[in-house]
Image (cartoon, helix red, strand yellow):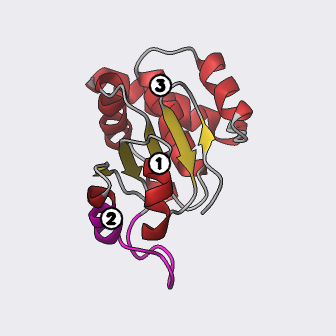
Amino acid sequence: MAEIVRLDDTVYVTGQIAPADIAAIAANGIKLIVNNRPDGEAPVGQPTAAELELEAGRHDIRFVNIQFPTAQIAPGHTVKLAEILKTEQEPMLIFCRTGTRSTMLWAAAQLALGNSFLEVFEKAVRAGYDLRHAAPMIEQLGKLAQAEL
C-alpha cells in the first residue's frame, strides 16, 4: 500500500489501495473511503470499486465513489466531496492512483467551502503534494462548486 498522509484533521490521502489493505486502514480509524479512480484505469492489477467496497463493508467502513480521470475533474466532483467534507466528522481516506488527483479535488472542495487558498495549499505541500501547477484550475473549480453549494 502507498503511504497514507494527513491533509487535515479528518482527511487522509493515498495512492491506489487494495482489498488486502483495508484491514490496516480500518485499524487506523478510517470510517469512510472515497474513491477517485475509475475502474479499468490501469490495464492490469487495479481492483474494482466493487471489490474495494465489499471489503470496506466487512470492516464497517463506508465507501463512496467520486470517480473521474484526472483530465476530467469537474465542479460536480468538487461539490460531491465538499458536501461530504461539510457533514463528515469521522476520519476519511481519499485515494486515486498516486494521491495527487485526490489532493487536487480535496483542495478545490476546501476552497468551495470558503477555506483560505493559502492555508489549503500549505496543507497540501506539508502532505507532500505541490499543487502550484494546477492552482488556477483548482481555484476555478472551487469557485464554480461554491456557487452550487
Q: Earlier in the sequence, mark 1 or mark 2?
A: 1
Q: Nearer the viewer, mark 3 or mark 1?
A: 1
Within 10 Å of the Cα at label 2, are there few (<14), some (14-19), or many (20+) other Cα atoms? some
Q: Is residue 52 magenta?
A: yes
Tell me which secondary structure the magenta stretch mostly adopts. Answer: loop
Say which residue appears at 42% left-offset and 54% top-offset: 36
The tag on residue 27 is 1
Image coords of residue 136 (percent x, y)? 60, 33
Along the horizontal axis of the image, is 18 left or right of 74?
right
User: From which residue to which does the magenta span run?
Assistant: 38-55
Say which residue appears at 44% left-offset and 55% top-offset: 72
Which residue is labeled 2 in the image? 55
Q: CA distance from mark 2 to mark 3?
A: 29 Å
> Which amino acid type is shown beneath numbered disc 1?
Ala
Evaluate if marks 2 and 3 touch, with contact meaning CB atoms under 8 Å apart: no
Along the horizontal axis of the image, is 38 left or right of 136?
left
